[in-house]
Amino acid sequence: MINGVMKMLAGMFALMLGASCETSTKSDLLEREQAQKNKEVVLNFYQQMFGDRDISAVDRYIDKNYIQHNPKVADGAEAFKAAAATWFQSAEKIKVDVQHIAAEGDLVFIHIKNRNKDGSLKSTIDIFRLQGGKIVEHWDVHENVPEISANPHPMF
């Protein structure tokens, strides 16, 4: 009888482990799928907004209550559109040069090679938080690429 109970407990334990692994695998798959969708949202937004200079991209991709951590831009989608209108005055369309993109949870990290107004190279890293398929929060860091580097590693 004890042997039978042990076998039954071992079987139940194996089933629980299998279910746990299956649930974890499904959960991981869903997370990866969501991360991929979030990267696509950010890539589409970035090209349309900063490459095509299409301010209406804000209406498609940015939540109206957008939280902005760049100290030069106010919160909200409308404030972002107003700021972008000044950035894009007489600016030509470009192909956004994405160097890296990664996603984890509700965050997407994108590293861009771009140019300052004087034509010099700049490295930009933007971090976006998404919710319900929309960008709800943003952080960014910009760094000019120096002409001379102390090491042989490029910034891109």
Image (cartoon, rainbow, N blue to C red):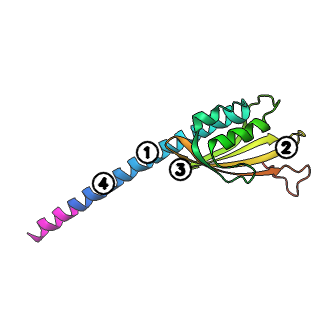
* Residue 55, horizontal then vertical, whole percent: 68, 33
Residue at (82%, 45%) from the top-left corner?
122
Q: CA distance from mark 1 to mark 3?
A: 12 Å
Above or below, 53 against 6 in this view is above
* Residue 95, horizontal then vertical, whole percent: 74, 31
Residue at (91%, 52%) from the top-left corner?
148
Q: CA distance from mark 4 to mark 3?
A: 28 Å
Left or right of 23? Residue 74 is right
Above or below, 155 against 114 in this view is below
* Residue 94, horizontal then vertical, whole percent: 77, 30
* Residue 73, horizontal then vertical, whole percent: 72, 48
* For marks 1 and 2 on the same chain, the one whose residue lies earlier in the sequence: 1
Give the amino acid at mark 2.
Leu
Above or below, 46 against 6 in this view is above
Q: Which residue is mark 2?
A: 121
**Quadrant, the N terminus:** bottom left
Q: Secondary structure at mark 3?
A: loop
Q: Which residue is mark 4?
A: 18
Q: Secondary structure at mark 4?
A: helix
Labels 4 and 1 touching (C-beta < 8 A): no
Q: Secondary structure at mark 2?
A: strand
Check disc 2: other Cα within 10 Å, few if <14, some if 14-19, many if 20+: some
